[in-house]
Amino acid sequence: MFLTAVYAVVAIVMVISVGFYISFVTVEGKDERGQAIIGRSSQIAFIFILFGFVFQMFYIQFADPSVENIETAIYIWMALVWCSNSISIFILRRKS
């Protein structure tokens, strides 16, 4: 029951984040300012990717998780990457 709720929330967050990213890229991502925003937000998202790899490595090494726990951690990790990308686009767009 709990994991179903987590999957639902993660799926909603990912759909919103991906939708925001795609809409930005198609509408504003073609000019120089949009390309700069996309580049900077991708750098921020990359930091979350690196943290996720390190977390997964330590989680698997020291916690002895089940496959279901690893899947849940990966789903949450991907939602954080997409969220960080979308939030950074939102903030960078407002700054410039």
Image: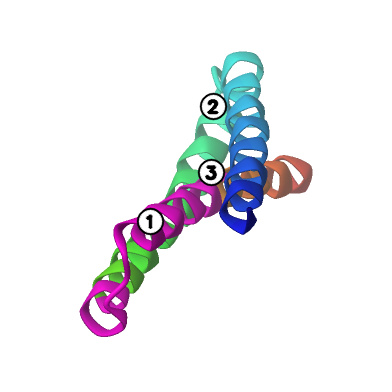
Let me know if residue 62 is in the magenta part.
yes
Residue type at the position of mark 3: Trp
Left or right: 39 in relation to 26: left
Looking at this rendering, what residue extends furthest in the right direction? 94
**Which mark's residue is nearer the viewer, 2 or 3?**
3
Let me know if residue 91 is in the magenta part.
no
From the top left corner, tell me how far across and down residue 72 is, in percent.
45, 55
Question: Could you give the CA–CA distance between mark 2 and mark 1, rounded to whole angstroms?
Answer: 43 Å
Looking at this rendering, what residue extends furthest in the front direction? 1
**Residue depicted at 66% across the width and 49% down the height:** 5
**Residue depicted at 71% across the width and 40% down the height:** 93
> Which mark is first along the chain, 1 or 3?
1
Q: Residues within 10 Å of mark 1 (few under 14, many from 20)?
A: few
Residue nearer the viewer, 59 or 65: 65
Quadrant where the C terminus is found in the figure: top right
Residue 90 occupies which quadrant of the picture? top right
Q: Which residue is mark 1?
A: 68
Q: Which residue is mark 3?
A: 82
Assess whether mark 1 and mark 2 are in contact (beta carbons under 8 angstroms).
Answer: no
Q: Which residue is mark 2?
A: 32
Label 3 sits on a secondary structure element that is helix
Q: Which residues are magenta?
A: 58-82
Question: Could you give the CA–CA distance between mark 3 and mark 1, rounded to whole angstroms?
Answer: 21 Å
Looking at this rendering, what residue extends furthest in the bottom direction? 62
**Which mark's residue is nearer the viewer, 3 or 1?**
1
Residue 48 occupies which quadrant of the picture? bottom left
Label 2 sits on a secondary structure element that is helix
Q: Residues within 10 Å of mark 2 (few under 14, many from 20)?
A: few
Residue type at the position of mark 1: Glu
Please determine whether, in this image, residue 91 is positioned above or below residue 11. below
Q: Residues within 10 Å of mark 3 (few under 14, many from 20)?
A: many
